[in-house]
Image: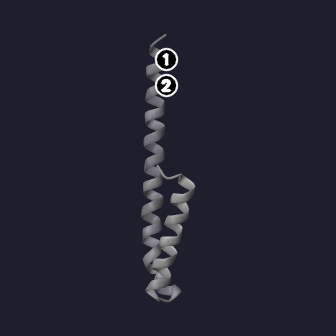
Amino acid sequence: MKPISLIIRDTQKAIVEAINGSQLPPSILEQIIAPIHAQIAQAAQAEIAQAEKEYSEEGQKDASCY
């Protein structure tokens, strides 16, 4: 599997290339990117909440083994 640092670099590069390739002005790009950013932030929060729930449930399982 590719290291996360390389995945991040490649993803950033692809996003920058797509933005530059669009040749749209920043005011239009902001209208495109802002809702995408909001969706990503919402998905990240949901991911954290799910991880906390799973971690908490695992802790309860481990405690019940004793």
Residue 31 found in image quarter: bottom left
Residue that appears at 43% across and 28% down: 57
- How far from the left and from the top, in percent, is residue 24? 46, 88
- Circle 2/circle 1 CB separation < 8 Å: yes
Q: Which residue is mark 2?
A: 59
Crowd around label 1: few <14 · some 14–19 · many ≥20 (10 Å): few
- How far from the left and from the top, in percent, is residue 21? 46, 84
CA separation in Å, label 2 and label 1? 6 Å
- How far from the left and from the top, in percent, is residue 10? 51, 65
Residue that appears at 57% across and 56% down: 5
Q: Which mark, residue 63?
A: 1
Front position in the image: 65 or 23:
23
- How far from the left and from the top, in percent, is residue 63? 49, 17
Residue that appears at 52% across and 71% down: 13
Give the farthest residue toward the front: 1
Q: Is residue 42 above or below residue 52?
A: below
* Three-letter amino acid code of the residue under disc 1: Ala
* Three-letter amino acid code of the residue under disc 2: Gly
Dot 1: element: helix
